[in-house]
């Protein structure tokens, strides 16, 4: 049980670490278009993202894939920027069926973010044989999922306060959150090239 708790904490810490703002920015941007009444859709969306990065973490941890970290570190903010742009320009109301594309987007972008986790995860797996990787991988990803859900819960709470008490329009909320996510992403992208 100690092993489970250790890897679970590593997953939570990895996702909530403010030095690794990219993952947090992606989750917040991904969920900016949703309202609290859509919590089931958000849960499925965040889980699709987790499934995506779990697959690439497993493949990387088993040394079945090797990725160029510099390329991945550039692609991660691109995923945030594309998500922000999609949130701002899309016409479909997520409450009326527009979420299917978002599931695919979250899953695909999860693959990319999982590649970003791969070096960190591999360093945790030093000395562990391939057969023993399943338990740490599971525990680590449960921690990541839990951390993501805490972030989303905080985001939704702030959304409810602003849209209910202060009468902020949900469209304005989406524009500000998605715009901020896009701005963070642009800064990160430029940092890679400057």
Image (cartoon, rainbow, N blue to C red):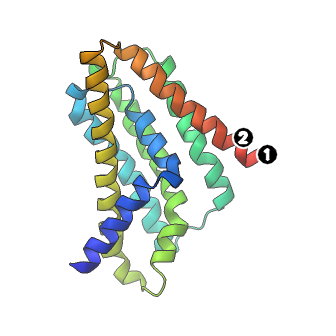
Question: Camera-side residue: 14 or 101?
Answer: 14
Q: Is residue 22 visible?
A: yes
Q: Which residue is drawn at 26% across and 72% down?
A: 5
Instruction: In the rendered view, tell whether residue 170 sits above or below residue 36.
Output: above
Q: Mark 1 points at which residue?
A: 194
x, y percent for residue 59: 47, 67
- The vertical placement of 94 against 75, above or below, is above
Q: Which of 156 and 35 is in front in this view?
A: 156
Query: Which picture quadrant has residue 173?
Result: top left
- Where, by quadrant of the figure, is residue 85 drawn? top right
The reply to whether dot 1 and dot 2 touch (C-beta < 8 Å) is yes
Which residue is outermost to the front?
A: 166
- Element under disc 2: helix
Work out whether 134 lies above or below 48.
below
The quarter holding residue 194 reads top right
Residue drawn at the location 41% of the way across and 37% of the way down = 28
Disc ID at residue 80: none
91 to the left or right of 136: right
The numbered dot on residue 190 is 2
Residue 92 in view: no
Q: Is residue 107 above or below residue 164?
A: below
Mark 1 nearby-residue class (10 Å; few <14, some 14–19, many ≥20): few
For mark 1, give the secondary structure: loop
Q: Distance between the residues labelled 1 and 2?
A: 6 Å
82 vs 156, left or right, is right
- Residue at the location (61% across, 63% down)? 67
Q: Where is residue 82 in the image (x, y as percent from the top left)?
A: 55, 32
């Amino acid at each position: 049980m100690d092993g489970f708790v250790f890897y679970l904490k590593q997953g939570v810490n990895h996702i909530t670490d403010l030095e690794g703002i990219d993952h947090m920015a992606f989750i917040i941007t991904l969920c900016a278009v949703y309202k609290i009444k859509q919590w089931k859709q958000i849960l499925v969306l965040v889980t699709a993202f987790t499934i995506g990065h779990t697959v690439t973490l497993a493949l990387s941890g088993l040394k079945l894939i090797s990725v160029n970290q510099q390329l991945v570190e550039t692609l991660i903010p691109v995923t945030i920027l594309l998500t922000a742009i999609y949130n701002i320009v899309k016409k479909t109301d997520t409450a009326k069926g527009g979420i299917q594309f978002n599931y695919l987007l979250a899953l695909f972008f999860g693959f990319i973010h999982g590649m970003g986790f791969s070096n960190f995860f591999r360093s945790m797996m030093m000395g562990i044989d391939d057969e023993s990787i399943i338990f740490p991988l599971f525990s680590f990803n449960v921690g990541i999922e839990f951390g993501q859900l805490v972030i989303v819960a905080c985001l939704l709470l702030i959304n409810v306060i602003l849209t209910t008490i202060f009468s902020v329009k949900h469209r304005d909320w989406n524009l500000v959150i998605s715009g901020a996510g896009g701005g963070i992403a642009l800064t990160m992208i430029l940092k890679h090239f400057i």
